[in-house]
Image (spheres, rainbow, N blue to C red):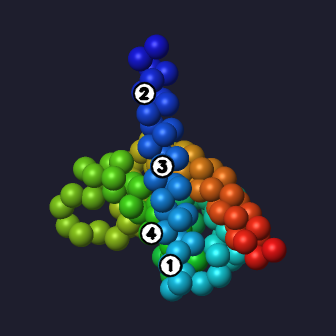
Amino acid sequence: MAKNIQRVGIENGRAAFAFEAVKKAKEDKRIGKFENYRSYVKKMPSLIQVNGLGQALAFCYQKEKEYGAIYQALHEWFQEKYPHAFQGDKKEFVQVVINLPSAEYRLWTMEALALLNWMRKFVDGMAKENEEKEQ
């Protein structure tokens, strides 16, 4: 029973964070078109699965606007979830990820995919809200 409660708490925390990240991206005019952001959030899990988390983050790191917002959301989530990994010298998020031991790297990959799954759900919902307002 305690494991189930812990899992629900983790999922709720992930869901709440994902909702706020997508909402922030939707309201931030510097990010670009929300429709592009929506598309990129939906593509990001495939990008991670095909290329690996480090490669996907490196791609996002070089981009701006929509991919930059996804990178920033992942960075904030991991900084909140694993603060010990970010202590010490001020390394860039992608630098922290590519230097992880293999087992941790796989764990972080699964965590990123889980967060992006929530973000995908919310980005679709918020896009539908936009469509309804325009009609």
Foreground pick, 104 / 131: 131
Q: Name the secondary structure under disc 1.
A: loop
Report the residue at 60% width, 84% height from top.
Answer: 32
Q: Residue 91, percent across and down?
A: 29, 69
Q: Amino acid at mark 4?
A: Gln
Dot 4 or dot 1: first in sequence order is: 1
Dot 4 or dot 3: first in sequence order is: 3
Q: Name the secondary structure under disc 3.
A: helix
Report the residue at 70% width, 75% height from top.
Answer: 35
> Pointer 1: what residue?
28
Dot 2 or dot 1: first in sequence order is: 2
Foreground pick, 131 / 81: 131
Q: Are marks 3 and 1 in contact (CB under 8 Å)?
A: no
- Alpha-carbon span between mark 4 and mark 3: 16 Å
Q: Which mark is residue 16?
A: 3
Dot 2 or dot 4: first in sequence order is: 2
Q: Which mark is residue 6?
A: 2
Q: Amino acid at mark 2?
A: Gln
**Residue 88 drawn above or below residue 10:** below
- Alpha-carbon span between mark 4 and mark 1: 13 Å
Q: Which mark is residue 72?
A: 4
